[in-house]
């Protein structure tokens, strides 16, 4: 039940082989049993979920059920859910209950999905391992001593462990795709502006994206169908027509040109990962795709540019957390300065404070031009590299991460090492082009993912190629031991 | 001593725009009395909320740009200006820093001499207002009211081209009148919907070096602006002539003590960490929209001033009053349409009797209990001889109370002017009988008692006797 696709579940729900309430209860039983080991869920929403399930059953009975009626999902805990705690895995928002839903939460509610609960993340989505969460780290179901990746680690682990049908995550530098790769599931980062950011607690406004994590391309197509579209509440969302993602899923991929950027085959790349990637590429070639070597010459600058723009914007977005109107407030503040400094010192974890300080420095009067402006110029170069590439190829393929999941605590104090695990994903955040990570094999029992990217608003193409790959492979059907 | 020196002033004005909703949220813009009743999630900077630009605010800013011949920037951008203060919910204000909406505008000001001077407005831009701190001991703390947070402001900056308190006041008045004419700001100085800060420095005449200047904040009346500048100018000159320096600082005007003082809060030099607002797109302006806005602009203040002078031959000061008080000017013109009395004389009635009446009860002209055509009706009765001016003044007061027309009051009280000579003669006879001493003196040669005698006849007739005929009959050597 918990490994069935959305299409299969829909069929079972429609034929009343199972009810939405039963389905939700089934997942809750699994969550009770299996979540403690991985800490994917930090909150469960049993009461509202069962109410939603009852309404879904009514809709199904009436024959007028919306697209995802009865499908059990969960949201990363930086998506605001009305009346339900939304914490960003931070002490700062431990007591925060939003009086509004994020647009994508609202859309999925309208589509009939059942929200089972909220999922763990790195504090304020800052991280690549979920180790900075106020509620403790999440664990990789494939190896509990390893990280699931981050910052949407809880979202990826939940899918791998069969604790939700699909989950949502946010991707600022790779935070949907990297954990998806490390947990052996699909993670989609849509085009910037394809999906509304309203109600998503902002990290870096020009880099944040919301996307689904699922087992199959078809499941991702369902979710994207429900959440894509212009939102007047988000001025950066784009009024671009939403195609029927399911309709084109099964198209022939013959003749599609897939570029392999030579820059990705660098010294940081584990050669075994490189091998698995070439296997995946060859499989697509067998189906008629044409492989081409391409160059993205400014790729090596992406990580630096990212680590200027992201903390700069984050320091600004987190300025509102001051203990005045909501969230954590220090005890007995003596005066305004004391209120601010102790609230923020106590409410934020170390990584968050680190990035706020760096971000503020980067925006400061003497350094703004040298860092932030320059980083934005590099961003333009990275975008242009992609545009040039898309004149020669339709898609770009590269490994999602340079290595498989690392052990909890392994990256320890080595921040740069931690940041480098995002090196293959950040450039598409800078350019805003859509990209997807999908499982392509295992190394020592740990999953590996490949990343396909394409030009703006061509998500349908990503889903199509991924689907065709998954038809011929079963990586995505593997189940971690103990989570059957 | 002081004539060696000149004062240099620049103004920074914040006009709250009269939009239906706030600049970046749908909250109603009209201020509620109940604290925090109009603060939405966006206004409070709650997590995950995003700003959405109010088109009406842009329209109003463009109107101001058109009226000041400014360059309207297509593709202006918003920036974040960061600082921590409890009335600033997001920890940053959304403003326009790199590319303001309006640039290189000008405004003409009228000086007391009648001279016109052009002042440059280097830029004007949109920004959101912060909330209000209420230091009123709310449970031992300061309360913050976020009703004002997110209100749309148009910040207007003048070049430092004002060289006296009078010029500064004239400039502030000109901008104040303009924004009211354009219906973009209600101009209520005391409510804070039109705020002014003044940058003041002094220098030796002929000097062009930039001098240290002070910023005087929150001058919410034209008089306070003048007084503050006068004080500050003297203060700075005193410092410099005694060999001291003028500190670059922020001050406020202490109304009671009639002096500027350093602001209590120690102003640290703040780095606002400006960067372009990533949640908002650049404002793209359609030129056809600008044309529509241009067509919606009615007569501008100086245009009205010039037209009133030319068409109505009234005095410059009168025209100025009609310019600054548009409702009074509208009332004047509405009255003119219904009466044959000359504009000059009508103006005297409006700026005299009518204004006195309105001021007594603090009513603006557009809420006058006597409407323009009612006033015109009254004035017409003077022209056709039915009423004396003296009587008409009394009737005006009755009209204000009863809201009846002049003709109704005349009819009800049989108040039409008496021109019948024998009736008048009867009253004259009464006066002769009751004032023998004055009559004797008058006949003996004290001609200036004529006015007194006419006045007595007028009293007897309850103001109805035609004064000219009274005079004629008294002076005819017969009685």
Image (spheres, helix red, strand yellow):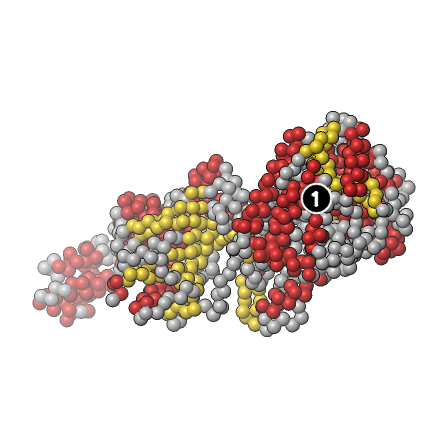
Say which chain tag 1 marks: A
Q: Residue furthest left?
A: B444
Q: Quadrant where the N terminus of chain A lies?
A: top right
Q: Residue furthest front?
A: A267
Q: Residue B54 at x, y = what percent?
A: 55, 47
Identify the residue at image location x=65%, y=72%. A332
Within-10-Å neighbours for mark 1: few <14, some 14–19, many 20+: many
The quadrant holding residue A467 is top right
Task: Pick the residue in front: B271 or B144.
Answer: B271
Task: Pick the residue in front: B383 or B426.
Answer: B383
From the viewer's perspective, tell me whether residue B227 is left or right of residue B89. left
Would you name the residue on which mark 1 appears?
Answer: A425
Identify the residue at image location x=59%, y=41%. A380
Report the label total.
1
On screen, residue A149 above or below B248: above
Q: Which structural element holds mark 1?
A: loop
Identify the residue at image location x=59%, y=71%. A335
Q: Residue A54 at x, y = what percent?
A: 83, 48
The quadrant holding residue B441 is bottom left
Q: Residue B153 at x, y = what percent?
A: 49, 53
Residue B320 seen by the camera: yes
Q: Residue A258 at x, y = what percent?
A: 72, 32
Residue A220 seen by the camera: no
Task: Pick the residue in front: A234 or B385.
Answer: A234
The quadrant holding residue B417 is bottom left
Identify the residue at image location x=27%, y=57%. B206
On screen, residue B475 above or below B297: below
On screen, residue A191 above or below A115: above
Task: Pick the residue in front: A342 or B418.
Answer: A342
């Amino acid at each position: 039940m918990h490994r069935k696709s959305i299409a299969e579940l829909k069929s079972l729900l429609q034929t009343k082989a199972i009810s939405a309430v039963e389905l939700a209860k089934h997942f809750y039983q699994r969550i009770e049993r299996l979540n403690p080991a991985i800490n994917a869920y930090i909150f469960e929403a049993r009461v509202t979920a069962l109410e939603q399930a009852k309404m879904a059953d009514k809709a199904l009975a009436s024959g007028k059920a919306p697209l995802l009626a009865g499908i059990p999902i969960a949201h990363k805990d930086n998506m605001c859910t009305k009346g339900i705690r939304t914490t960003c895995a931070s002490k700062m928002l431990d007591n925060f209950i939003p009086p509004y839903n994020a647009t994508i939460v609202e859309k999925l509610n309208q589509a009939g999905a059942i929200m089972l609960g909220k999922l763990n993340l790195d504090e304020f989505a800052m991280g690549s391992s979920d180790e900075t969460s106020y509620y403790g780290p999440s664990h990789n179901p494939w190896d509990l001593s390893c990280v699931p990746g981050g910052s949407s680690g809880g979202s990826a682990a939940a899918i791998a462990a069969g604790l939700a049908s699909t989950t949502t995550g946010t991707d600022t530098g790779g935070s949907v795709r990297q954990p998806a790769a490390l947990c052996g599931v699909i993670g989609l980062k849509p085009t910037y502006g394809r999906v509304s950011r309203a109600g998503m607690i902002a990290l870096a406004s020009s880099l944040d994206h919301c996307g689904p994590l699922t087992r199959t391309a078809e499941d991702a197509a369902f979710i994207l169908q429900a959440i894509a579209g212009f939102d007047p509440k988000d001025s950066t969302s784009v009024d671009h027509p939403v195609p029927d993602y399911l309709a084109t899923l099964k198209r022939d991929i013959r003749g599609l040109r897939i570029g392999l950027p030579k820059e990705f085959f660098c010294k940081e790349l584990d050669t075994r990962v490189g091998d698995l990637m070439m296997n995946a590429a060859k499989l697509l070639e067998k189906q008629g795709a044409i492989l081409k070597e391409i160059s993205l010459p400014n790729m090596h600058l992406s990580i630096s540019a990212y680590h200027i723009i992201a903390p700069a914007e984050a320091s600004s977005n987190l300025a509102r957390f001051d203990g005045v109107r909501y969230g954590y407030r220090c005890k007995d503040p003596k005066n305004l300065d004391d209120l601010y400094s102790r609230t923020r010192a106590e409410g934020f974890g170390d990584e968050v404070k680190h990035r706020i300080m760096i971000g503020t420095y980067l925006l400061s009067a003497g350094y703004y031009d040298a860092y932030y402006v320059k980083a934005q110029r590099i961003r333009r170069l990275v975008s242009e590299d992609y545009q040039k590439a898309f004149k020669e190829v339709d898609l770009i393929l590269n490994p999602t991460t340079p290595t498989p999941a690392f052990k909890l605590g392994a990256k320890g104090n080595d921040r740069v090492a931690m940041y480098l695990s995002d090196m293959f994903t950040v450039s598409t955040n800078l350019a805003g082009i859509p990209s997807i990570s999908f499982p392509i094999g295992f190394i020592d029992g740990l999953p590996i993912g490949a990343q396909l990217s394409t030009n703006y608003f061509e998500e349908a193409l990503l889903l199509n190629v991924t689907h065709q790959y998954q038809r011929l492979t079963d990586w995505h059907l593997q189940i971690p031991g103990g989570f059957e | 001593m002081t004539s060696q020196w000149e004062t240099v002033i620049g103004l920074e004005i914040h006009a709250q725009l009269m939009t239906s909703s706030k600049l970046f949220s749908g909250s109603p813009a009209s201020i509620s009395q109940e604290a925090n009743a109009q603060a939405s999630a966006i206004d409070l900077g709650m997590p995950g909320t995003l700003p959405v630009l109010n088109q009406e605010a842009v329209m109003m800013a463009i109107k101001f740009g058109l009226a000041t011949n400014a360059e309207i920037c297509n593709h202006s951008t918003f920036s974040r200006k960061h600082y921590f203060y409890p009335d600033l919910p997001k920890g940053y204000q959304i403003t326009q820093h790199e590319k303001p909406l309006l640039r290189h505008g000008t405004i003409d000001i009228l000086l007391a001499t009648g001279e016109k001077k052009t002042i440059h407005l280097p830029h004007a831009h949109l920004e959101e207002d912060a909330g209000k701190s209420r230091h009123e001991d709310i449970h031992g703390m300061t309360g913050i009211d976020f009703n004002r947070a997110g209100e749309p402001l148009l910040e207007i900056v003048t070049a430092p081209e004002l060289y006296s308190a009078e010029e500064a006041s004239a400039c502030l008045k000109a901008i104040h009148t303009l924004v009211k004419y354009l219906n973009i700001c209600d101009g209520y100085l005391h409510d804070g919907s039109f705020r002014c800060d003044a940058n003041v420095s002094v220098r030796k005449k002929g000097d062009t070096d930039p001098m240290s200047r002070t910023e005087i904040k929150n001058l919410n009346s034209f008089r306070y602006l003048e007084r503050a500048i006068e004080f500050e100018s003297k203060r700075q000159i005193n410092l410099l002539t005694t060999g001291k320096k003028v500190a670059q600082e922020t001050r406020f005007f202490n109304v009671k003590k009639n002096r500027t003082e350093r602001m209590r809060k120690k102003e640290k030099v703040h780095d606002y960490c400006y960067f372009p607002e990533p949640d908002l797109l650049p404002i793209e302006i359609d030129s056809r929209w600008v044309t529509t806005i241009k067509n919606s602009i009615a007569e501008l203040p100086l245009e009205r001033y010039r037209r009133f002078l030319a068409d109505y031959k009234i005095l410059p000061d009168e025209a100025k009053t009609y310019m600054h008080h548009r409702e009074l000017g509208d009332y004047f013109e509405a009255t003119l349409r219904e009466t044959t009395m000359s504009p000059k004389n009508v103006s005297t009635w409006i700026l005299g009797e009518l204004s006195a009446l309105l001021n007594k009860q603090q009513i603006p002209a557009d809420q006058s209990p006597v409407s323009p055509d009612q006033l015109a009706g009254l004035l017409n009765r003077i022209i056709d001889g039915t009423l004396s001016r003296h009587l008409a003044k009394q009737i005006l007061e009755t009209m204000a109370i009863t809201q009846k027309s002049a003709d109704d009051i005349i009819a009800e009280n049989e108040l039409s002017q008496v021109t019948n000579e024998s009736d008048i003669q009867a009253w004259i006879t009464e006066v002769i009988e009751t004032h023998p001493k004055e009559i004797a003196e008058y006949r003996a040669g004290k001609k200036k008692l004529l006015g007194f005698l006419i006045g007595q006849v007028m009293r007897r007739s309850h103001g109805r006797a035609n004064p000219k005929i009274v005079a004629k009959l008294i002076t005819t050597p017969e009685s």
